[in-house]
Amino acid sequence: MRLGPEVNRILYVKNLPFKITSEEMYDLFGQYGAIRQIRLGTDPKTRGTAYVVYEDIMDSKNACEHLQGFNVLGRYLVVMYHRPSKIQKKPVDLDKKEQELKELKQ
């Protein structure tokens, strides 16, 4: 079976309850296969999100299909594949950087 190009071992999970523990995350996502790592967001900007890394890509695919929209403590999970190429990077102002370098040289 061929998998789509977006499928990988890392899932990005949003809309998590703020009070969920890592043990509860392992119980929930561990039903679908061996987990290598779970990273829960702790900063104010990342609270309610997590990364779940599976050992096998098929376990990741299975978890994504079954847990999308799953209700956890009154919140519906949003589960998607991690896509680092889609992360927005801040545009670099080259003129500003060049000016900073000139100031440092002096």
Image (cartoon, rainbow, N blue to C red):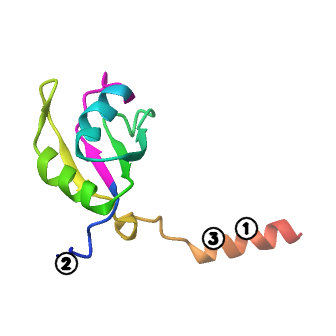
Left or right: where 60 falls relative to 51 = left
Residue 28 lies, in percent from the top left, at: 24, 34
Residue on which disc 2 sits = 2
Q: Do the residues labelled 1 and 3 touch (CB within 8 Å)?
A: yes
Q: Quadrant of residue 17?
A: top left
Tell me: residue 36, above or below residue 103. Answer: above
Report helix, strand or loop for mark 2: loop
Residue on which disc 3 sits = 96
Q: Which of 53 and 13 is in front in this view?
A: 53
Tell me where the magenta segment starts and ends, as one range: 11-22
Residue on which disc 1 sits = 100
Magenta segment: does it hold 86? no
Left or right: where 91 falls relative to 7 = right
The answer for how far apart the CA atoms under marks 1 and 3 are is 6 Å
Name the residue: 21% across, 74% down: 3
The answer for how far apart the CA atoms under marks 1 and 2 are is 50 Å
Residue 106 lies, in percent from the top left, at: 89, 69
Which of pointers 2 and 3 lies earlier in the amino acid sequence? 2
* Closer mark to the observer between disc 1 and disc 2: 2
The answer for how far apart the CA atoms under marks 2 and 3 are is 47 Å
